[in-house]
Image (tube, rainbow, N blue to C red):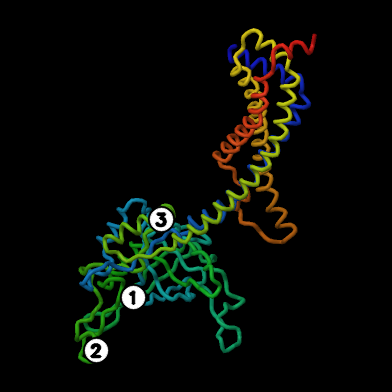
Amino acid sequence: MKFTDQFRFVRQNMKKNKTRLFMTVLATAMGCTFLIVLASVGFGLQKSIVDQMVVDRMVTAIDIYGIESENEVDRVIGAKNIEYLRSVDHVKAVTYRNYVQQPLNPTVDGAAASSNGTVNVDFDAETKAGFGLSSGRLPQKPDEVVIGFNIRETREGASEGEGNKPKADTPPAKEWLGKVMSLQVRQLAEDGTEQTATIPVTIVGISEKPSREWETDTFVYIGNEILTRIESFTQTQWGAMLLPADKDNPDSANGNQPLGLQDPRQYNSVQAIADGANHVKGIAEEIREKGYYSHSIANELKQVNLVFLIMKIGLGFVGTIAVLIASIGIFNTMTMAVTERAQDIGIMKAIGAHPSTIRRIFLLESSMIGLLGAIIGTAVAYVISIAVNIGLPLVIEGFMEERVPEDFIFSLIPPYLAAIAFLISLGVALLSGSRPAKRATRIDVLRALRRDI
């Protein structure tokens, strides 16, 4: 008996009992839907919570403090070290933040900014690392800068009983977007007189608001091109002012002048940004072997991922129970099918059908029930998942007056979850039909034929 004939025979028999077949497939589909939807909650929460943490720079960043060396000079991070760190596999960016070593007194339209300093960053690296902005964009031209979120704020004094809080009439920093800021650079001439130069820059971005309410960001972030202009004027690294060369200045007499442009450059607040939290440990181990002192908090995600793994396994187990309950309906359907088709089984045996062929026919029918239930159940699960992701934020916002983040996902169905549900449904269906199929092979030919004579 060819497989096509077996399939045609099964299809004809399934058509004879459409109502019973429909109820059995419906029960299987409901169990499959329950399994997928429950497990999808675990996947969705992990996607929204853990993945959000993974892409956070705080997690993917490796702080590098220096290099192991007996020589104090060699312990600091230099240009060659930056190049090496950028060459390490899975490092997408290496950033640094160095302060300009003098106040630049930034002003916009004659109004002084409440800036605590100017910071030099590599904007190309910061673009890859994910520099947080609340407004605007990162610089694309040499004369463009980013300013801190709180740069226009003036603070209430603690003596007034308000603590260190911004005044109510503080204008937002984003009003300065597109405006020109003037930076004043100073340096001492050989005769001891102070010289100044004004560097006009354009504000194109505002940093994101600090996550902690007591923190403030009042810095001016400049790129390497502006730093070069500052250093060209001061002839010192990071724009440091020279010390007066006189007998009354012990630092000058001892030669403790700032580093010149010809001296090796030193970098502070260096971070190696990994392209994923799963690569942080490997990168840290590799650079640690080279003598770099580093630290990262990415390993703490292991515990979080373990919790979600246990959660997904638990939800999947509960969903599997629903599929097992549906298997009772498959078992009853197949048992009744064997009883109703006793004459057909007797005829197949009489014409020489092998018991394995008879068993295969009933297993094929039970597997078709399982696959139909899995297909319908998976389709319904996807619909429910989409509806939950769209509707639940609206419900929370409407009844609880809480706003859900736009990229938050409550339910996520990865392809392999649907594949696992298919395999579970098919396996349960085959197990449910195996005993009735085995019983079909034991039917006596004469008794089966004699019953209808």
Q: Amino acid at mark 3?
A: Gln
Residue at 72% across, 11% down = 446
Q: Are marks 2 and 1 in contact (CB under 8 Å)?
A: no
Classed neighbour count for the residue bearing mark 1: other residues with Cα under 10 Å, few (<14), some (14–19), many (≥20): some
Q: Is residue 339 depicted above or below 78 in this figure?
A: above
Residue 345 lies, in percent from the top left, at 69, 15
Secondary structure beneath disc 3?
Answer: loop
* Residue of label 3: 140
x then y, percent, for residue 423:
58, 34
Observer-side mark, 3 or 1, equals 1
Looking at the picture, how far across and down is residue 306, in whole percent? 52, 55
The earlier-in-sequence mark between 2 and 1 is 1
Residue 204 visible in the picture: no
Q: Quadrant of residue 426?
A: top right
| Pointer 3 or 1: first along the chain | 1
Quadrant assignment, res 441? top right
Q: Quadrant of residue 381?
A: top right
Quarter the C terminus occupies: top right
Residue drawn at x 27%, y 64% as measured from the top left = 291
Q: Which residue is mark 2?
A: 249
> What element does badge 1 sit on?
loop
Marks counted in the figure total: 3
Picture disc at residue 195: none
Residue drawn at (21%, 72%) of the image: 70
The crowding category of the residue bearing disc 3, from other C-alpha atoms within 10 Å (few below 14, some 14 to 19, many at least 20), is few
Amino acid carrying mark 1 in the image? Gln
Is 56 situated above or below 23? below
Q: CA distance from mark 3 to mark 2?
A: 43 Å
**Which numbered disc covers residue 101?**
1
Under mark 2, the amino acid is Asn
Number of other residues with Cα within 10 Å of mark 2, as a class: few under 14, some 14 to 19, many 20 or more:
few
